[in-house]
Image (cartoon, rainbow, N blue to C red):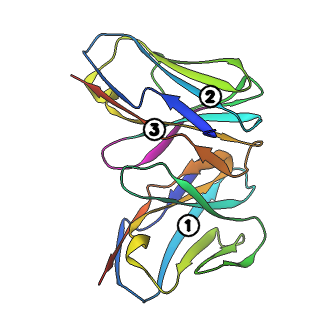
Amino acid sequence: DTAVSQTPKYLVTQMGNDKSIKCEQNLGHDTMYWYKQDSKKFLKIMFSYNNKELIINETVPNRFSPKSPDKAHLNLHINSLELGDSAVYFCASSHRENTEAFFGQGTRLTVV
Amino acid sequence: GQNIDQPTEMTATEGAIVQINCTYQTSGFNGLFWYQQHAGEAPTFLSYNVLDGLEEKGRFSSFLSRSKGYSYLLLKELQMKDSASYLCASYKLSFGAGTTVTVRA
């Protein structure tokens, strides 16, 4: 009965590959987010969706493409992975914008 | 846009009080959040202030001054388990870099 679940938890892949991280929330929330946390622990917002519509798209390479098939899911697809993409990626959801967010466990991506 | 600033690190002794400051500049304001993140774990919600003043929740309190663009998180009766990063977040949940608090015996 995990509230926000993301898979996989760990992902090790080679440069140039394409990979996806999945996120699902069972809280009935309208808003979902993707964050990147690098080695310096800075938690940077990448995307935010509200009712399946993109509302935040920070300065992120277009190799990163979020997809929201429905309100409960926000997946992150990454093309042509680079070494600098290595980080922990967190999915989160909130009832609506600017309310308490619940985070998934994180996906540790390592590009080799 | 967002500009959130908080100290990088703080160290305190078990049983003591620590105050973590956060200043923000934002194009839109709809509250100020504080989250706690233990090493290797996901952030978890601590508090939310939308009006000026102090919100107390057990050993943790959070203060907001909208006119000054300033907030602080107050941790009282520090315990070893409080060693973590504390993240301030503003409009559209844009986070600051976090303050790593180390509690020493």
Does the magenta-highlighted stretch encompass residue A77? no
| Residue located at (48% from left, 87% from top) | B77
**Residue identifier under label 3:** A106
Amino acid type for the residue under numbered disc 3:
Gly
**Residue identifier under label 2:** A24
Give SS at disc 3.
loop
How many marks can you see? 3
> Are the two marked residues, 2 and 3, in contact with CB atoms closer than 8 angstroms?
no
Q: Position of residue B66 (x, y in %)?
A: 71, 69
Q: Determine the chain carrying the residue at label 1.
A: B
Is B54 placed left or right of A74 in the picture?
right
Amino acid type for the residue under numbered disc 1:
Thr
> Are the two marked residues, 2 and 1, in contact with CB atoms closer than 8 angstroms?
no
Residue B15, picture quadrant: bottom left
Q: Nearer the viewer, mark 2 or mark 1?
A: 2
The magenta-colored residue range is A38-47
| Residue located at (37% from left, 85% from top) | B14
User: Which image quadrant: the N terminus of chain B?
Assistant: top right
